[in-house]
Structure formats: structure tokens, C-alpha cells
Amino acid sequence: MLSFNDVSPELLGRVEVFKNVTPDMIDGGIAGTVNPSRASLDNPGFKIAGTIEGNYGDLAKEWSPGFSGIISNTWETSGGSKFGLQLGYAKSELISRTDASQLTDPCYRADTLTSTCLRVRDVGSGGFGNGTGFNETNFPPAGTVIVPKGAGVRTTTLERDREAFSAVAQFESGDGRLVATAEFLRSNTKFFTDEYAILALVNNDAGFPVQAAGSTWTFDDNNVFQTGTLTQTGGDSGLSPWGGLPTELLRFQRNTKATTEDFSFDAKFEATDRLRFNFELQHIGSELSQDAIIGTMATFSDVRIDNSGNVPNVEFILPQGAPQGIYGSPEYTYFWFLLDSQARNEGDLNSVRFDAEYDISDEGFFKSARFGTRWAERDRITRDSNFGNWGTLGAPWTGRDGSSNRPGPSGPLPGARPYGGGGGAYPIDFPDASSFRNPFADGFQRGNAPVPIANGGGFFYGGDDFIGEYLNGTTAAQGAAITRWSFPDRLGEAWEPITDRTNSDGSACAPFCTGDISDVTEYTKAAYARVDFGTDFGNGWNVVGNFGVRYVHTTVKSGGRITLPNPNRFDALAAGGNADGVVQVSEIQTACKQLVQGGPAGTRLLFLVCHQAG
């Protein structure tokens, strides 16, 4: 029941793994049963032990310290009874960094490279669309090559801080027939993730990459793309005066805290030389809280790729004709979207076990018999918004003050802001909501890959403590101000934090909606019987084995709700409906058509309904 991410291995004496499960073992293990056994008090007297360690991450360029200590002592009474006490503490930190390069959405293209991807089903900004006529008999078509639609790079830093306490108390009677052990373990774990990524946006086949001027793409013997520079002029790229692939500069932070407590009591009693009993109690409680925020800016770039090695080299370069230094300018990158998520989970396990063992014979074929029973109750409540509230902060095509080509509340906009109809919001408009950062400038891929963008960075959303700003409300206030600036008449697509969501009945989610919550309770009753046998033959051979039976009855109760998108996303006038308060099939079809085409009603929240409707 305990995760090795939560339990410090320094406080474990050994880990026993059983692949062949016998009837007396605890049920529920599919791939095997793992029995973590903590350090015992088998060694009498006063004992102290400890460890000190350090890990160095060459990418993170950070030392991660760790230490643990165990102290134990035993006492013996005049009657021969023994008492033992063991206390343990462990603390460890781990700081690591991961760099990654990727090719995105490789697809079949005609070898003329003048048309979009060839697929079995159309793909739009909202997901899959209609069939294209291809099937297993004619796909892939002849005369095609495989070309990525884009590429991406990311650098991720993970910080883990784990702290664990343990206490073990033990009693043994003077005659050795009774041994009782009580154990307590508490583990606190914190994970912090900080990620920066640059990604070519490839979610709409209306746009597709072509060869940049002066670049000739190369392919291997299997017609798979190897080298070349990608640019784009269709789709969203038409909003850029110099084309280029729509490019996201994404920042992701997540803070996770987990606490696990385990209390167990075990008593072994030897009633006679042949009859023994065992009684166990256990309670495990675990809680997890998680807060996460994604903020994304956007610009345009050409992408230079070398896929001839084991890891692709990816560079986001200026589109031809673009001014120098645009990735360091607050007037050429715009605010794109925000996405937040929270989780609050808790679980408990209570179990009782009783076993008896009787030695039948030392010389006969049947050696011993065991029987026992076990009862367990597991309760789990999961509350997880699961990144379900994607919302945009604007874009060049959204205009300002609700309409394309209209100035914002502050009057005509100075400066470049060259994209589309002059819409969207830029860092120069909201300087406190983003800043220039260069996370890729410091030894990306240990220096084995080129710096993926000029000066190693660009404008990324948020301040130094992005997750802190999200939790104290700063990000929500910034998002509201940006969306008011960008398109106040389209708030149906604008980002709102999960704390502002409402249930279908109008009640506040605060912050979890009814569809975010699931409650599962599991009751297990089990009993077993086992007989061990064995015999020796005169030639030195022997046979040893057991047979038995186990009965397990499990009852599972679960509760939760499946929620659908807000009806206004189909019925509202702005979505193409008639606003009569009733969602019609024709209104769903209209919204889904706009979704696949990337029209005004398009939003990722509708994808599931549209997929089922199609």
C-alpha cells in the first residue's frame, strides 16, 4: 500500500518480493506481493547508525544532500521479558534536470510537398473530423514521404524533498512465547516541477510546413525526413507578415505535497510447542495536494531540424524577412493561453488479520496446517480538475475591445505588434505578466545540441514564483485584465481560473465541480487454509510443497458524476444556437463544425461531445 516515492528506503530493513503467491499471503497482488520489512530490534543493546549522502546533477548543476539516522535500545526485566524501542529519521533532497528535443506529428505527405497531411480522418484545432476515404487497403498512398509538422524542445527541473519518521516498539515475554510489535511511519514528500518549452503549434491541418527558401529537405531510404528548414504560410501563419510556424513558449509549474502515515500492530503467540497464533492490525492514511499552472505565449518562427542522429537537433529561427531580435522584443510575442489544475486526494486503509498454524508431524508426510482470515476496508476520495479549463488570453485574430482592427481601451496602439488584425495583448501592454527568460542558454543537452532559439529564450508568462502568483490570485487578476483588453465580447473562450467555475445548477465549484470528484470504497473479506507436506527418499531426493485454498469476497462502492459542457456553448446565439434554453442536435452539429474548422465556437472542451456526435 505504500509508494516507494513516499517511504524513505533508509528506514527499511529489507524488501521481500514474492512472485509465487501462497494461499496465506495478502490478496491483491497481480504481479507479485512486496513485503517491506523495516529494521527490527533483533540486535540487543544500545545501537546508533546513520548515513550521509550527496548526489550531484550535472545538468542541474546542484548538489542534493541526504541523511538518515536510527537509534535503538533494549531493556530486560528481572523476569526475562524484553522491551525494545527504535526511532528513525531520514531526510533527502533531489534536484534533477531533463532536457528534451522532439519532432511533432510526423505525417504522410505527397512527395511534391505542396499539400497538407494525408490522414484517415481530418484533423482540426478541436480534434478529429470526417473520414478522408483512406483505409487499410490504400493507406499510406504511393508516392508519399513522412514529414514532421513541427518540433519542440523543453527543459524540466524537478525538486524533491522527502522527510520520514519511524518508531518501532517491541515486547517479548520471558519464555519467548509472545512477541508484540507496534510500528509507526510518517512520510512527507514535496515535489516541485518547473518546465520551459518551445513548441511549434501543429493542431490544425489547415496549416502545414513547406520548405523554407534556400532549404532543400533530405530524406532517408525509407522516405523519412532527415534535414531541412520548415516554414509555413497557410492557416494561422497567414497572420504573420513573414509567415513561419505558430510557436508556443510554454511555462509549467506544479507543486505537489503528499503525506502518508502507517500504523501497525502485530502479536505472535505460541500457545504450545505445536500451535501458534498471529494477530495483526494496520491503518494507513494518505493525503495529496497538487497545484499546477501553465502559461503560454506565442510568436512565429521557422524551424531548422537535423534528424540524422539519435536525438533530433531543433532550432527555432527567424522567418525570412522578420526583423532581427524579435524574440527578445515585447512587441513580437503575444499572450496566448492559461491553464490551471488542482487536486486534493485522500485515502485510508484499515485491516485486521488473524492466523493460526499447527505442526502436524515432524516425521510424517503432512508437516503443518495453517488457516486464517482477513478483513480490509479501503476508502479513496479523488478531487482533480485535471486541466479541464483551457482558455485563451487572446490572439492576433481576436481584435481588441471585442472587434478586429479596433483599438483597445487605451486608444491606438503604438509600436510594431505586427500580427493579424492588430489584436491580442503583448508584453509591452502588460509588462508585469511576463518577462524575458533564457532557460535554454545554459548547456542545453549538455552542449551536444545547438541553442534552440536566439539567446536561449524568449518571453515566458509569469514572474519568478509563477505558482505562488497563481495561488495568491495574481495570475487570475492578470488573466482577467488581459482578456478584457483582448476580446470582452467573447468571454466564452476566455480563460477563467478553476475557482470561478460553476456546476450545472449554478452552484460554485469551489474549486472542484461535481464531475471532478469520485469516491470509492472497497471492502474485502478473505479466508484461507494451507497444508504443507514433504518427504525424503532413500536416494537423497526429497519432495516439499503445499496445497491450499483461499476465498476472497470484495465489494466496491463508487460515486461520481459525468458532466457535459455548458449548454450555452451550443445554444447561445454567439455559438450559432437560438438561445431557447434547449440544446438541439442541429446546434451541436453547428458547434462541432466550427470546432473542426477552428471557428469562433471552437474550444477543446467540446471535443468529446463532438466526437460522440460524429
Image: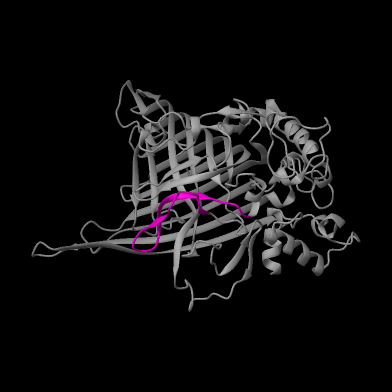
Taking 480 as reference, is 552 above or below it?
below
Which residue is most to the bottom? 137
Q: Which region is colored magenta?
A: 210-234
- Please state if 123 lies on the left or on the right of 424 as rendered: left
Give the percent coordinates (x, y) of residue 460.
60, 33
Taking 8 as reference, is 234 above or below it?
below
* Residue 90: quadrant of the picture: top left
Which residue is most to the left? 539
Q: Is residue 287 magenta?
A: no
Looking at the image, which residue is at 55% across and 32% down? 324
Looking at the image, which residue is at 41% across and 26% down? 88
Looking at the image, which residue is at 44% across and 53% down? 26
Which residue is most to the right? 580
- Please state if 539 lies on the left or on the right of 260 as rendered: left
Give the percent coordinates (x, y) of residue 499.
74, 39
Q: Nearer the viewer, residue 447 or 537?
A: 447
**Looking at the rendering, in which quadrant would you find the C terminus?**
bottom right
Q: Is residue 88 visible?
A: yes
Q: Is residue 186 visible?
A: no
Give the percent coordinates (x, y) of residue 5.
46, 39
Colour scheme employed for the rendering of this structure:
one colour
Q: Is residue 231 magenta?
A: yes
Q: Nearer the viewer, residue 421 or 18?
A: 421
Looking at the image, which residue is at 37% across and 61% down? 530
- Please state if 382 lies on the left or on the right of 229 as rendered: right
Give the percent coordinates (x, y) of residue 612.
68, 67
* Residue 29: quadrant of the picture: bottom left
Query: Exactly how many numbered labels are in the figure?
Result: 0
